[in-house]
């Protein structure tokens, strides 16, 4: 197993992910690529509910990644292909990582995702978009009636080389399907993070009244993971106050029972419900 900024390569226990190269066909033959059409292609993939047939004509990295958390300091875009051990085959532009799996929340109730990534970051639950934290519009691209709830400016301050976006509140009462998109369009820099917020949890706040949130985390972090989280937290402390590192909600893979230490109840069959209320 190799730990990378995009997950654990060749391991299990996270959300499985695959890297696609939009510049090559499935056999590795170069094909035309236009960075201006990158988001259109990614959106088409999402709008087809991430059907495998939508990406079958593109090169796919042979090794699978497992998502555990996303905290990527600004770095050159070739770190994406390098994480998948295909840096010799995939140029650092026009690549896309798709993670998909079933998760169980650590606690029932209303949750939302918050994040940012240069260039593409979007989260879908049970096939529906709940966060678009991309550098430019992805989910609402070309939509006559944009879904403003999935892309709300969050925090009022910048982070890394952009700005965090907050997603829509969703009620999670049991196992749910998640799809996460991370990608790079022109091949310059990459960097970003994915946070999670529980509506009823009281978080520490910055001097400017911004909640300090934990990373969205799948599986219990090991010592090496925590060290990397701490390093990343220090990098963004003067931007959004850093990360919550003591109380990290752990999402588990598969249809595992929700921790009942606080008598949390599972409502079978419910994964995504419209949440009432505002932000």
Image (cartoon, helix red, strand yellow):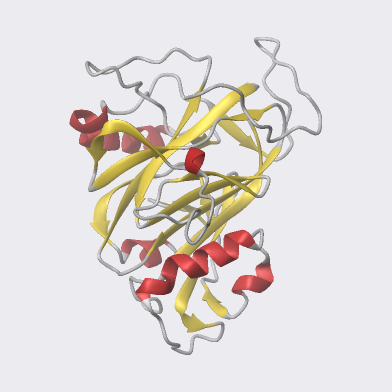
Q: Residue 172 at what x, y percent from top left?
A: 66, 29
Answer above or below: position of 65 versus 245.
below
Q: Is residue 80 visible?
A: yes
Residue at the image position 45 percent from the left and 34 percent from the top:
222
Q: Residue furthest left?
A: 238
User: Who's the residue at 74% across and 17% down the image?
Assistant: 265
**Image position of 277 with respect to 235: above or below:** above
- Residue at 44% across, 88% down: 30
Q: Position of residue 46 (x, y in %)?
A: 59, 59
Q: Where is residue 159? Give x, y as percent.
A: 25, 40
| Residue 10 visible at all | no
Which residue occupies the extreme right position in the image? 268
Image side of residue 44 versus residue 265, left or right:
left
- Of 30 and 80, nearer the camera is 30
- Residue located farthest toward the top when viewing the structure as drawn: 262
Q: Residue furthest front?
A: 144
Q: Which residue is painted at 39% across and 67% down in the image?
A: 81
How many numbered discs?
0
Percent across and percent down for residue 165 are 38, 39
Q: Is residue 240 above or below residue 29?
A: above
In the image, 151 versus 115, the foreground residue is: 151
Q: Quadrant of residue 2?
A: bottom left
């Amino acid at each position: 197993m190799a730990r990378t900024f995009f997950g654990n390569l060749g391991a299990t226990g996270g959300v499985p992910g695959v890297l696609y190269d939009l510049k090559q066909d499935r056999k590795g033959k170069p094909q035309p690529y236009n960075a201006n059409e990158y988001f259109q292609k990614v959106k088409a993939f999402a709008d087809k509910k991430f059907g495998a047939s939508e990406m079958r004509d593109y090169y796919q990295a042979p090794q699978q990644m497992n998502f555990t958390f996303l905290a990527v300091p600004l770095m050159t875009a070739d770190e994406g292909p390098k994480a998948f051990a295909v840096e010799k085959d995939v140029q650092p532009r026009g690549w896309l990582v798709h993670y998909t799996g079933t998760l169980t929340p650590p606690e029932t109730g209303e949750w939302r995702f918050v994040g940012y990534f240069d260039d593409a970051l979007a989260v879908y639950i049970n096939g529906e978009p709940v966060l678009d934290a991309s550098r430019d519009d992805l989910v609402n691209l070309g939509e006559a009636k944009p879904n403003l709830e999935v892309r709300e400016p969050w925090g009022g301050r910048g982070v890394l080389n952009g700005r965090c976006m907050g997603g829509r509140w969703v009620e999670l009462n049991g196992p749910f399907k998640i799809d996460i998109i991370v990608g790079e369009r022109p091949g310059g820099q990459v960097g970003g993070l994915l946070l999670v917020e529980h509506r009823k949890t009281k978080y520490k706040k910055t001097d400017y009244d911004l909640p300090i949130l934990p990373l969205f985390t799948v599986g219990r972090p090991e010592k090496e993971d925590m060290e990397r989280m701490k390093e990343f937290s220090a990098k963004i402390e003067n931007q959004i106050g850093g990360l919550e590192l003591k109380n990290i909600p752990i999402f588990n893979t598969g249809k595992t029972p929700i921790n009942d230490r606080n008598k949390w109840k599972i409502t079978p069959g419910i994964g995504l419900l419209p949440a009432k209320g505002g932000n």
